[in-house]
Amino acid sequence: MKSLTALLLPDIRELIQNHQPSDLREILADIHPADIADMVETLEVEDAARLLAAQSAEFMARIFEQVQEDRQLAVLQMMGRDRIIALIEEMASDDRADLIKALPERTVDSLLPLLAQVERNDIRRLLSYEEGTVGAVMTTEYASLSADLTVIEALNSLRKVASNKETIYYVFVTDTARRLVGVVSLRELVLSRPEQLIRDIMTSDPVFLAVDEKQVEAAHMIEKYDLLAVPVVNADHKLVGIVTADDVIDVLIEEHTEDTFRYGAAGEPVRYATASPFSIVRQRITWLVLLVLTMFVSTWALAGFELILNQVAALAFFIPMLMGSGGNAATQSSTTIIRGLATGDVQIGQVGQIVKKELIIGLTVGVALAGLAMIRGFLVPASQANDQVLALALTLGITMILVVTFATVLGATLPLVFKRFGFDPALMSGPFITSVLDILTILLYLTTAGLLIRF
Amino acid sequence: MKSLTALLLPDIRELIQNHQPSDLREILADIHPADIADMVETLEVEDAARLLAAQSAEFMARIFEQVQEDRQLAVLQMMGRDRIIALIEEMASDDRADLIKALPERTVDSLLPLLAQVERNDIRRLLSYEEGTVGAVMTTEYASLSADLTVIEALNSLRKVASNKETIYYVFVTDTARRLVGVVSLRELVLSRPEQLIRDIMTSDPVFLAVDEKQVEAAHMIEKYDLLAVPVVNADHKLVGIVTADDVIDVLIEEHTEDTFRYGAAGEPVRYATASPFSIVRQRITWLVLLVLTMFVSTWALAGFELILNQVAALAFFIPMLMGSGGNAATQSSTTIIRGLATGDVQIGQVGQIVKKELIIGLTVGVALAGLAMIRGFLVPASQANDQVLALALTLGITMILVVTFATVLGATLPLVFKRFGFDPALMSGPFITSVLDILTILLYLTTAGLLIRF
């Protein structure tokens, strides 16, 4: 698909630049809006704006919904006020709310009064939900009806509203106070006899989400029950929106990207292909500076052990190996627990069990690595070890067990602590845990050396 | 939902142990199979098997499809051969293929001959697709029809087959050779006049996937075009299956988990809650041992610079800081590129652009961190620096720029190289890149020191 779009691009560009809007409209009518959105992102901004200007308001909205946010904002700058209003009125309610959220406040204040009352209210309501909640991703364009209709009445009313709804595959059943009482699928409607009542074929008390729940809950619910959409209710159990499976797919992909950047301490995700190097630097440098400052502590810790290090030169050779092993062990257990918390495989209340399990894991792994470290220790020439090769090897072995065990347990518990205090456990990135452990490794290592090696 | 299930569990357990299958059936009939699957995972294996034995073959299959694989296998051990055959015949084709794949070969060989020919062929075909491909996740239970039918004929034929199909919201249109020629949605069928022909309302040449494409392509396609399902074709463009949005959600969640474990070098994902500590050790220890062996190289590298380290004690204090900065910079750029490759934001052909961008980023960040490192260097007492504080500070600054720049570029390019040679770029985990960089940092640091500091 991507290549087809790329193939067409030169012709499209020519039509735009020769001002042939009707030809342009005709060619694009056969192409999926998502593919045209790719073109809008690739063309010069002026050409992209002209491409959109040539379309009907409705088709323009279908394309625009699929365009990346930064490009949406750039194209809007080129559009007249009337056209922007038409666009906003035609956009799907959830995409529209996302766009309004990204606009400067002044622009929003000048646009809102020009919209119809019902759309203004819809936007205001969606904007009021916190980022990351179900409310911020749901759409208000769902189909709903009363339980007293017959199947044929329901199908007729669906036909009338279908074009404005995100999905008609699930129809939500509400009472007179708009409280959610059931759901019926289009499949069930089509398979039922025309005169049957909705209340007799609907699923009563369907699963639902509260408007302030996390978006990832919507993903879990849709995955668990194999749904196409989940209804969203407010505190009075009134139906206020739905979250569809394709919205959930977007949420999951976005969440995966955010998590990856957090593990890598790489800041907020950027669109790499279009981001300038300096905008990427801005994302990355905060963490790097923080980590260097943390590591200042390790330089002081080492300086504190200057005497020991001077007498037994070989001690310094093993610092990277011990630090690395601690960092790796902690990264392993922290990623396991962070992901377990996200999928629900690990619960915050199981902290006792987790500590016990990681203690056994850490000790087992620590003993195995200690064996390797001691072998390496015995290979050190006596001259470099102040004639105490055995003491050096023992120091390495004991330190390895201590460091790896401690790292494994700490790596598993820090995400739990973060979660407990309401932070995202994924903030416990590998680089952060590793830097903290570096300091601890130095203290454990050189203290043990001080006890075992005669100076 | 989880708590409701937990609430019911004691009653359910009592009914099972008092052998009251009909009461059990009655209570469970009102509960979603996915919730009953939770119970099957929580109960003792014997009780879980008895719970399933009390259900009709069809309802048992709906529950069983949602049970985790390890528990599926345990429960199967308790079931009679006839019951297993009934279960396999009722299961959805994709879930069934997954189960068969997990069974020991001997068991499969004894079961397959007992199945009907058509199911045997279906299983054999699905088993032949490689893990991770579209073929391995698709279902063969799609609805298809000819373009020559009218809307009313299509709806009537759908009503007959609906109960056996994974979805009837998309109906796929094939020619007499079963080649894919179009798709029509149930929405369009319901909204069209009964006498219209399918060929006049269908979308011709719909998007499709090849059976050997990666599963993540299915996710991208469904996400991009907001679909409920994508048709899958073989090399002759014959329709062989469909991938549905809820299958894609499973794939995305699984992929996220696998990636997380790879970044953390934590082996293959395990179910943490039920896994024994030693099975987790098995997953983690391979990487840790490999990394310790890699770090043996860094101990030898340091030993090679023994003379310099002995003369300027302070040099050793900064090794962790320099190594850490290199590791962190590489982790940042590698996670960015790995995720970009997965989402399609970064293309393997852009390697020139990427190297250029990361070179600018690395140099900028390197200079900033070099400033910090030099400040720390100037704080070193002259006695520890062999009276050459300026040379030490310069060494730190220059090394920091070299290490961070090199780390940033290497972190970005290694995943591209991996991808180029057909490996998963996510195998370029933080711990692995960090260990390789440690060695390089030592060489750059102590060589620079040898050039700038007089001994």
Image (spheres, coloured by chain):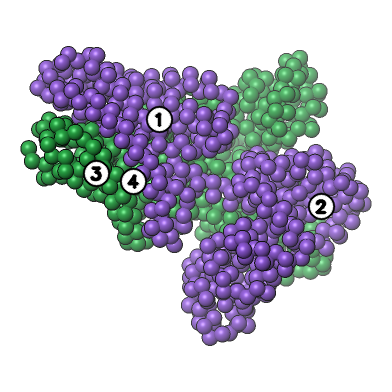
Chain colours: A green, B purple
Secondary structure under badge 2? strand
| Quadrant housing the C terminus of chain B | top left
Label disc, if present, on residue A271 of the rendered structure: none
Q: Residue at 78% across / 47% down in the picture?
A: B239
Secondary structure under badge 4? helix
Q: Residue at 32% across / 26% down in the picture?
A: B441
Q: Which callout, 3 or 2, points to the residue nearer the camera?
A: 3
Residue B119 point in image, percent of width and height: 74, 61
Label 3: chain?
Answer: A
Secondary structure under badge 1? helix
Q: Amino acid at mark 2?
A: Ser
Separation of residues labelled 1 and 3 (CA atoms): 30 Å
Q: Residue at 71% across / 55% down in the picture?
A: B124
The residue identified by callout 2 is: B144
Separation of residues labelled 3 and 2 (CA atoms): 67 Å
Q: Which callout, 2 or 4, points to the residue nearer the camera?
A: 4
Q: Which callout, 1 or 3, points to the residue nearer the camera?
A: 3
Left of B130 or right of it: where is B309? left
The residue identified by callout 3 is: A374
